[in-house]
Amino acid sequence: MDYAIATLGSHSALQILKGAKDEGFRTIAVCRSDHAFVYRHFGVADEIIEIPSYDDFYRVEDDLVSKNAILIPHASLIAYVNLKTIEEMRVLYYGNRRILYWESDRDRQRMWLERAGLNLPKVFKDPSEIDRLVIVKFQGARGGQGYFLAKSEREFRRKIGSARDYTIQEYVVGIPVYIHYFYSVIRGELELMGFDRRYESNVDGIGRIPANLQRDLKVTYTIVGNFPLMLRESLLPEVFRIGERVVEASRDICPPGIYGPFCLETVVTPDLKFYVFEISARIVAGTNVFIETSPYALIKHGRPMSTGRRIAVEIKEAIEQDRLKEILG
Ligand code: AMP
Ligand code: AMP
C-alpha cells in the first residue's frame, strides 16, 4: 500500500502538504472543525479529517494507521497534543520521537547545546544573581507569550507575579537570526534551508511610537509572522559548523540523533558571534516564507525546494531504497 503524508492543520501544514503533493504523495490534514475550511480552500489535502478540538487528536490514530499515513510533527502538534500521546501513538512518525524529550525542557536543551560547544546566553539560577539585562521565559512552545525583560532582582520580582516555571536568561543584544537546517539520513548530509526573522507583537511595534511614550509599555514577544532573511555569505561556514555540532551532540544524547528539519534560534552580536538561545527539533514555521523555495535550497537542489517538500523527498528516497525504518522514530 502507498504511503500518505499527514499533519495537523496549523503552523506549517500548508507547506508540508503542498511539498508532499509536489512529490506525488497522498495527503491528509487533521484539522479542528473550525479551521478545516482553510485547508479545503487551498486544496493541499486529499483528505481532511475533522476533530472538534486538539484534545481529540488521539482519536484519529486508527484512521491514520489504516491509511498508512506518515505523521509530520510541527510546533502546533507539540503545543496542543500531549507529549505522552505523541510518544505512544502507533502512527508512523517522521523524525526521532525521543528527541522531543530533550527539546521539551529548557535545561535538557541547554545540556544538548552545551555539549555541542555553542555560545549560549548565561542562565541565572536565582533572581538574586541578576546583574544585567535578562529575558524571563516560561516553559513550553507558547510563542514568546508573556516573556518580559528585567535589569535587576527588584524589577524581576515586580513583574513575575505568581508564575513559577520560568527561566532567567541573559538578554543578548544583537539581531535575531533563525537558522533552518535539514539533516538528511538518506544522503548523509546537513543542508542549509534558509533563515528567517520574526515579527512579534508588541515588541516590533514599539519602535513606531516615540521613546517617551514607550517607557510605560509592557514588552511582549507574541509571534505573529516571519520575514525571509539572507545572511552575509562569510557567516555561512560558522552556520554549517554549529549545525554539524548540534547533530553530532544529538547522536550521543539520543541515538540515532536528530534528523530532518531543525532550527537554531540565535542572536548575532556585533562581533559576529552566534548566541543560540533555543533549538526547535523539527520544522519551524519560519520556513513558511520559503514555501516556493529559499535561494539556498534552490542552489543546492537545482529546483524549487521548501522544507516541507524536502521532507517528502527524503521519505520518497527512503522508500525507494527500502530504508524507511531509518527515518521513522
Ligand atoms: P498555532 O497553531 O499558530 O497556535 O501555533 C502553535 C505554536 O507554534 C505557537 O505557540 C508558536 O510557538 C508556534 N508557532 C506558530 N506559528 C509560528 C511562527 N510563524 N513562527 C514561530 N513559531 C510559530
Ligand atoms: P523564543 O520564544 O525563545 O523564540 O523567543 C522569543 C523572542 O525573544 C525572540 O524575539 C527572541 O529574539 C527573543 N529572545 C529570546 N531569548 C533571547 C536572548 N537570550 N537574548 C535576546 N533575545 C532573546
Image (spheres, rainbow, N blue to C red):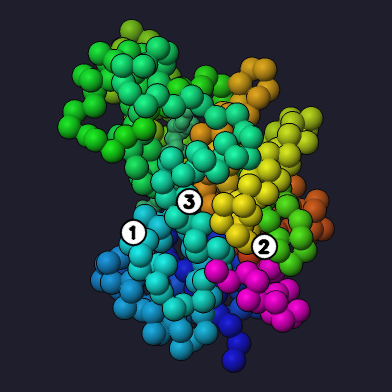
Distance CA(mark 1)–CA(mark 3): 18 Å
Residue 233 position within the rendered picture, expressed as x and y whole percent measured from the top left: 78, 33
The amino acid sitting under disc 1 is: Tyr
Occupied quadrant, residue 282: bottom right
Give the residue at mark 3.
102
Residue placed furthest toward the bottom: 1
The amino acid sitting under disc 3 is: Trp
Q: Which of the pair 120/206 is nearer the observer?
A: 120
Residue 278 position within the rendered picture, expressed as x and y whole percent measured from the top left: 50, 39
- Of label 1 and label 3, which has the lower sequence position? 1
Say if residue 77 shows up in the picture. yes
Label 2 element class: helix
Label 3 element class: helix
Q: Is residue 326 magenta?
A: yes
**Badge 1 local density, few (<14 within 10 Å), some, or many (20+)?**
some
Q: Horizontal placement of 200 versus 164: left or right?
A: right
Q: Horizontal placement of 100 versus 176: left or right?
A: left
Give the residue at mark 2.
310
Distance CA(mark 2)–CA(mark 1): 25 Å
Label ID, residue 80:
1
Residue 290 position within the rendered picture, expressed as x and y whole percent measured from the top left: 62, 51
